Image: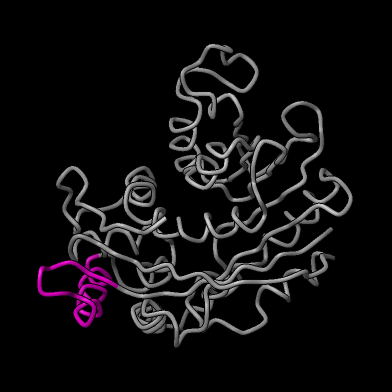
Amino acid sequence: MTPTLVRNQLGADASAPADAGTRARDWAEIQERMLAPLYEAVYDRMEVGAATRMLSLGCGSGLAMLVAAARGAHVTGVDSDRERLALARARLLPDAGWDDAPAHSPHPARRRARLLEDGVPAPVGADGAPYNLITVFEPIGCAAGDSEGLVPALRSAVPLAVRGATVVLTGWGPPERCATAAVLQVAARLADTARPPRTEPGRWRPTLRDDLEDVAARAGLKPDGSGRVSCPFGYADVGSAVRGLLSTGLFDAAVRATDRSQVEKEVAEALHPYRREDGTVWMPNVFRYLVCVT
């Protein structure tokens, strides 16, 4: 799947205050689709199809689940962000839940999906069978502490899967291969302006070579291959780019240290090298995935 430029959504102002609902919509409408090539590459390699029973940890607003369900997979998603989860439910279960979706539904993919709140996995897959694929599509490796909650989540999820199930972890590629890393450095610089300097989780840091392998080791998983995928970030204009990037949460520490308008202004300035003549913004990036077995 080739990423496309994201059009402005509903004419929203990039400088408008963002509540939880607005940020979740910005993620779903602007930013989430930038990772579609990553989803597709992983599903191709895992041969995701009708025999797949997938548990998606940190499923967000559900795009990766929707892609898997369209391939015939049975998918369960869990997330602690209720705003994003509500959007996932609207995408996947607009009229009915897992068990009561009618057999004649015009959207069969929606009969193969369920969503659970508070990040608590279900004990079994859709039809009583355990999961055979666990995915984590929220990339780690560029924010302090971004894997701390992942290790216990994986340890809780692995017993729900068949023995030898596949687990796929994803992360940012090397900073030199990610144009967005230069923009994310704005987050670290602004966070450092707080007095005393803030060091809380969520502050940007350079990606390390073995971030994914470290998580796998702590979760008791055995690496069994890896890959890299090109995921360019393309936006219709600077305003859309600012909204999309701030929806990731990677600038939250900077916003707390200064204010949202200051962060928006400096992110917009950092985006100028990636602005093209027609006003669009294009940033090449590479993401990693690590295939593990339980």
Among the 4 quarters of the image, the one containing residue 2 = bottom left
The residue most toward the left is 278
Q: Is residue 209 magenta?
A: no
Query: What residue do we see at 48% from left, 23% from top?
Result: 107
Percent x, y for residue 187? 38, 76
Percent x, y for residue 109? 54, 29
Rendered view: 229 above or below 55: below
Query: What residue do we see at 21% from left, 73% from top?
Result: 268
Query: What residue do we see at 37% from left, 76% from top?
Result: 180
Rendered view: 234 above or below 95: below
Rendered view: 222 above or below 35: below
Where's the N terminus, which quadrant?
bottom left
Foreground residue among 142 and 111: 111
The answer to whether 181 appears left or right of 26 in the picture is right
Q: Total label count? A: 0
Foreground residue among 175 and 116: 175
Among the 4 quarters of the image, the one containing residue 278 = bottom left
Foreground residue among 139 and 253: 139
The answer to whether 236 appears left or right of 92 in the picture is left
Q: What span is in magenta?
A: 261-282
Query: What residue do we see at 57% from left, 43% from top?
Result: 68
Percent x, y for residue 249? 43, 62
Percent x, y for residue 28? 38, 47
